[in-house]
Amino acid sequence: MCRVVPANLRKIERGETQPGIILAIRLVQAMGEPVGPFFRNLAEQAGIPLFIPPGSTDKKHGLSEMPCRYRELSNPRVLFGRWIKETRLAHGVSQRILAESACYHLRNMLEVEAGRREPGVMTALTMVCATGCDVVYFFDTLAEAVAASSNSK
């Protein structure tokens, strides 16, 4: 269902490895859990702080039109990269601040935003929290795109 080798799934379950964000979304969907709240709870349990940009009132800003705008993209990794970039820009967060917040090398951050690299689940979660975007909304929206891309194959 999730296209993961059982041995790798066992490593994920034991905490020996971290899945990429797209696989993590597929795993949550396969369990029948609501995706957005799952990631919000994960952020809270991990103690990942939510960055609130000064003067920011709309936590969804930067995402409202993305599903329509990127409907032609079938690769969720590319969608994540574009959404994290647009969300970062909408909230006035620099690439350097976002990379530092996620303990991620700036070069890797550039690759994520370009859709050439998929971050691990905790890195992706930290990135979303660092933008100040509503975590539930971001991941629910991304989960819809992941499900749509899986259904189109």
Image: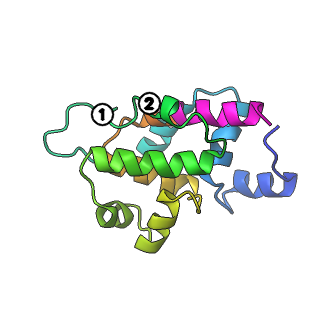
125 in relation to 16, above or below: above
The quadrant of the picture occupied by the C terminus is top right
Q: Is residue 34 visible?
A: yes
Residue 26 percent coordinates (x, y): 69, 39
Tell me if label 2 and label 1 are in contact, CB under 8 Å: yes
Q: Nearer the viewer, residue 130 or 10?
A: 130
| Disc marking residue 146 | none
Query: Looking at the picture, which amino acid does disc 2 mark?
Result: Tyr
Which corner quadrant of the image does residue 143 belong to? top right
The quadrant of the picture occupied by the N terminus is top right
Magenta range: 140-153
Please indicate whether residue 15 sits to the left or right of residue 91 in the image: right
13 in relation to 138, above or below: below
Check disc 1 and report the residue beneath it: 59
Indicate yes or no whether the magenta region holds residue 147: yes
Task: Looking at this view, name the residue that lies furthest to the left.
Answer: 55
Residue count near mark 1 (Cα–Cα under 10 Å), binned few <14, some 14–19, many ≥20: some
- Magenta region, main secondary structure: helix
Task: Looking at this view, name the residue that lies furthest to the right.
Answer: 6
Residue 71 percent coordinates (x, y): 58, 33
Q: Secondary structure at mark 1?
A: loop
Residue 89 percent coordinates (x, y): 30, 50
Query: Looking at the picture, which amino acid does disc 1 mark?
Result: Lys
Point 39% across, 29% down: residue: 64
Point 56% across, 57% down: residue: 115
Please indicate whether residue 127 sits to the left or right of residue 151 in the image: left
30 in relation to 122, above or below: above
Q: Is residue 46 visible?
A: no
Check disc 2 and report the residue beneath it: 137
Residue 91 percent coordinates (x, y): 26, 45
Q: Secondary structure at mark 2?
A: helix
